Amino acid sequence: MNKKIVEIYRKFANKWVALNESNDKVITSGTSIVEVEEKLSKTKEKAAVITFILPPDKNFAPYAYS
Amino acid sequence: MLIVEEIPFTQKPAISAEGRVTAFLTQPLVRVQLTYNHKISRTPVNCLVDSGADHNLFPAHFAEAIGVPVKKGRACTYIGIGNSKLIAYSHFLTLTLTGTSIAFKTKIDFSYEQQVPLLGRVGFFNYFQEVLFDEQNEKLVLKFSRTGK
């Protein structure tokens, strides 16, 4: 795995990040998609995707419906 | 016409409390844009294809980014691990898989207590002829027919 991606997980756990096309550079980050989009609108860099960085030191299992 | 999309799994590291990378896990993530009242989300968002989720469950701020009045939706309750509960609000939006010609109108539940967007069996899986988790080749294969199943 790209070492840059590992560093992204170390540094941005529990945050929303906007990534470049190769997913190895954080263009901007925030606590919500709204915040990240607002920051992106002020930069000339184009993001390929916005994603939530799960804490890499914990396991993840999602919810069910009632 | 049958559309087949192959989407590589996304890798994520598992890091121990001591800071060492102990494993590399893979997740079936797809890039999604939502449309509401002709407004489409500007940047695609990674969503987890979750065969264990009954419905689509997204963070509320994903909807707010395109002007959805989240709390005006019908409220519903979700339960999770350890009997934890959260409240979500249902809305109908157009969901587009970025970079593909796959798009459909569907129900999505939005919650202020949820972060990872989950694509569930009713609202995502049921729109496809086939959803294949190819673990050996680490990719998701989606078979979609415009005319339905």
Image (tube, coloured by chain):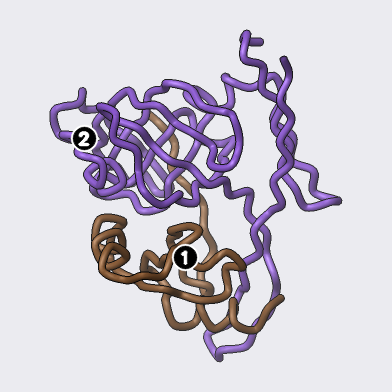
Q: Identity of the amino acid at label 1? A: Leu
For residue B68, the mark is 2
| Image quadrant where one finds the N terminus of chain B | top right
Which chain does tag 1 point to? A
Residue closer to the observer: B63 or B111 = B63
For residue A54, the mark is 1
Residue lying at 43% horizontally and 41% vertically, measured from the top left: B33
Among the chains, which one is brown?
A: A
**Residue B84 x/y as whole percent:** 33, 46
Drawing shade for chain B: purple
Q: Is residue B71 left or right of residue B96?
A: left
Q: Residues within 10 Å of mark 1 (few under 14, many from 20)?
A: many
Q: Is residue B108 left or right of residue B65?
A: right
Residue sitting farthest toward the front: A44
Query: What SS does tag 2 mark?
Result: loop
**Residue B78 x/y as whole percent:** 33, 35
- Of badges 1 and 2, nearer the viewer stands 2
Same subunit, labels 1 and 2: the answer reads: no
Q: Is residue B117 left or right of residue B78?
A: right
The image quadrant that residue B143 belongs to is top right
- What is the total number of numbered labels drawn onto the structure image? 2
